[in-house]
Image: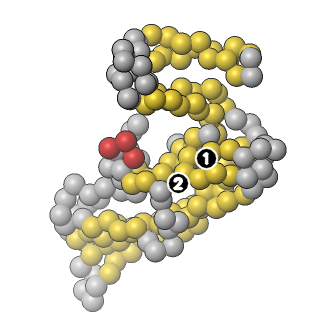
Amino acid sequence: MRAVPALDETAFLEAGFKNTEDAPLLPGNVSIYRDGVFVGRSPMPLTPKDQAVRLGFGADDKVKVARTVVRKTEGTVGITGSSKTDEREFKTAIRNGHDFPIRVSIEDQIPVSENEDIAVEMLQLTTPPTARDLHDRRGVLEWAFEAAPGEARDIKLGWRVRWPKDKAVVLSPASR
């Protein structure tokens, strides 16, 4: 199960495998079946030997994901108010409604600075991610874990951006 709750709180079923054949898997559409029932078609890219493939199997309505903003603070720091800050905290709640364990992958992101005058730091309250810069995407974090039947878990994420007061900064989510 994979979810990116900052964009959509839907949990999606996924299957993955590694191409262990000597020949590449050719690109094209594959038919997707879930529990013996056809659920759709999905494009599959050219997959060389030893490369991983991920295929989506649709929404999983038995897994609930909810992301909330816990705190958002903007202000100035320093004796003369020389810097501005934007600090945000989020909580993502996940609940496995299945009667069997599932593998969960939650993705989120923190801002990435392209300017040395703009500092980004992750707050200590953040649940340690299992991966950073996931799939070579800067600022993308992943929390991967096994969720027992009926288990509920919270993931906390917090970050602070600090920049000189004479600069303008616009924070917006990265496009996928």
Dot 1 amino acid type: Val
58 and 83: which is toward the camera: 58
Q: Which residue is mark 1?
A: 104
* Residue occupying the point 35% across, 68% down: 121
Q: Are marks 2 and 1 in contact (CB under 8 Å)?
A: yes
Distance Cα–Cα, label 2 vs label 1: 8 Å
114 and 145: which is toward the camera: 145
> Taking 126 as reference, is 135 above or below it?
above
| 9 left or right, relative to 114 | right
Residue 156 horizontal/vertical position (percent): 56, 64
| 32 left or right, relative to 55 | right
Quadrant of residue 79 within the rendered picture:
bottom left
164 and 104: which is toward the camera: 104
Quadrant of residue 118 within the rendered picture:
bottom left
Dot 2 amino acid type: Trp
* Residue occupying the point 36% across, 14% down: 23
Residue 128 horizontal/vertical position (percent): 49, 65
| 169 left or right, relative to 57 | left
Residue 136 horizontal/vertical position (percent): 32, 44
Q: Which residue is mark 2?
A: 143
Which disc, if any, is residue 147?
none
User: Looking at the image, can residue 37 be seen?
Assistant: yes
Q: Residue furthest left?
A: 116
Crowding at dot 1, Cα within 10 Å, few <14 / some 14-19 / many 20+, comes out as: many
* Position of the N terminus by quadrant: top right
